[in-house]
Image: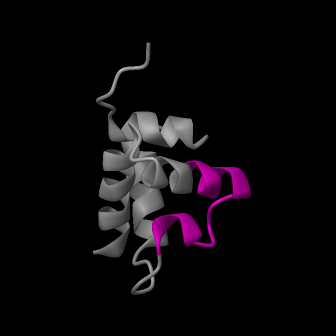
Amino acid sequence: MEKANHELGELFLQLGLSDEPAAIERFIASHRPLPSGMRLADAPFWTASQAQFLREEINDDADWAELVDSLAAMLSD
């Protein structure tokens, strides 16, 4: 059974990205800020499968949705 509380690094692994803290910081620094009003899943830096995963998690209010929202906030600031 999948655990409901995930860490940011686990989300990055789920997206096929490095979960190393420095890599996460670099990713956020190089992709922020998202244009005003742009949904995270619509950002141009995702692959089609990454965008689909993000969209599904939010639309389904699934286990990862809270972390997806957190990542969106980090990229929007």
Q: At 47% across and 58% down in the image, what residue appears?
A: 27
Q: Nearer the viewer, residue 52 or 29?
A: 52
- Total marks placed: 0
Verify whether residue 33 appears in magenta: no
Q: At 41% across and 84% down in the image, what residue appears?
A: 37
Q: Nearer the viewer, residue 71 or 3?
A: 3
Q: Residue furthest top?
A: 1
Instruction: Kindly indicate the quadrant of the structure image that contains residue 8.
Output: top left
Q: How is the image coloured?
A: one colour
Q: At 46% across and 47% down in the image, what residue appears?
A: 60
The reply to whether residue 20 is in sight is: no
Instruction: Kindly indicate the quadrant of the structure image that contains residue 44.
Output: bottom right
In the rendering, at what x and y percent does residue 48 appear?
71, 58
The reply to whether residue 58 is in sight is: yes
Q: Which residues are magenta?
A: 39-53
Q: Residue furthest front?
A: 60
Main secondary structure of the magenta stretch: helix
Specify whether 11 is left or right of 44.
left
Placement of 62 over or under 6, stated as above or below: below
In the rendering, at what x and y percent does residue 68 appear?
39, 52
